């Protein structure tokens, strides 16, 4: 209305005066520009992607912390069994003694490897996410945490497996009664089979179908998840 002052109040004069002051032509649309809408939409998508990346990073960070703690406990058991167990007064079978110490060493080594991998990922992964200067660095950080979690789980599982194997060999070295050795070996062997079965069953329960994009923003092939502002899930990595 202020633009109409001095124009006689005529509607045409008012419109021309407003257009002259705003730099618009007679036939321009005075509503919000489509470019501005696109920028707002893109900014919202970027914020959503960042939030999803942050949730993913927290998920893998907490998982690595839990696995690392459990691996440290297993490594402690294996180290105690390897260092504090004196087999000199037991069976004279060198092969059994060597098998026991080998299994205990493998258990400790795999467990400590799991601890090291989890610790390094939890130090460098969030650092890349925070200090990276673009979206690709965020995607790289989350993808790295996701990939390394598989190796961390494998190392932890092998540590638990070899700990049970060392227990079976210890039973044959330390027990003079063969029936006791058979009983302990049977129990531990049963649990080894159960552990392997549980790992595969639980993994199948929580594994996404092949080709489902299970995270936000983009992956290595730059495929957008939140295209068009929606929360659609896209197929094909």
Image (cartoon, rainbow, N blue to C red):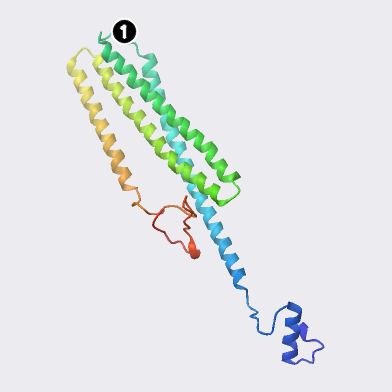
Say left or right for 224 vs 28.
Answer: left
Q: Residue furthest right?
A: 6
Packing grade of label 1 (10 A; few <14, some 14-19, many >=20) is: few
Q: In this image, 235 relative to 57: left or right?
A: left
Name the residue nearer the viewer: 26 or 186.
26
Please say if 62 is above or below 27.
Answer: above
Residue plotted at (58% across, 45% down): 130
In x, y percent, where is residue 221?
46, 52
Where disc 1 sits, the SS reads: loop
Identify which residue, 228 or 153, lies in the foreground. Answer: 228
Q: Position of residue 25 (x, y in %)?
A: 69, 82
The residue that mark 1 highlights is 88
Residue 152 lies, with reference to residue 209, above or below; the image says above
Residue at 56% x, 61% y: name it. Answer: 44
Q: Name the residue nearer the viewer: 42 or 60.
A: 42
Can you tell which quarter of the image residue 87 is in? top left
**Which quarter of the image is occupied by the N terminus?**
bottom right
Left or right: 216, with 28 as reference point: left
| Percent position of residue 226, x then y | 48, 60
| The quarter of the displayed image where residue 108 is located | top left
């Amino acid at each position: 209305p202020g633009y109409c002052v001095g124009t006689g109040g005529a509607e045409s004069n008012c419109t021309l005066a407003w257009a002259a002051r705003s730099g618009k032509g007679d036939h321009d649309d005075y509503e919000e520009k489509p470019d501005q809408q696109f920028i707002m939409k893109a900014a919202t998508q970027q914020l959503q992607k960042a939030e999803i990346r942050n949730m993913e990073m927290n998920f893998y960070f907490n998982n690595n912390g839990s696995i690392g703690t459990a691996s440290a406990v297993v490594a402690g058991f294996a180290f105690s069994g390897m260092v504090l167990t004196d087999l000199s007064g037991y069976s004279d079978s060198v092969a059994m003694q060597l098998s026991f110490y080998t299994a205990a060493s493998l258990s400790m080594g795999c467990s400590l490897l799991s601890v090291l991998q989890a610790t390094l990922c939890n130090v460098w992964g969030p650092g890349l996410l925070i200090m990276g200067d673009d979206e690709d660095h965020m995607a790289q950080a989350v993808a790295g945490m996701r990939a390394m979690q598989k190796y961390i789980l494998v190392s932890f599982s092998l540590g638990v497996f070899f700990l049970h194997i060392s227990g079976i060999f210890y039973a044959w070295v330390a027990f003079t009664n063969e029936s006791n050795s058979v009983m302990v070996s049977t129990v531990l062997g049963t649990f080894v089979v159960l552990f392997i079965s549980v790992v595969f069953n639980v993994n199948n329960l929580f594994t996404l179908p092949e080709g489902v994009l299970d995270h936000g923003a983009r992956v290595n092939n730059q495929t957008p998840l939140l295209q068009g502002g929606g929360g659609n899930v896209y197929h094909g990595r």
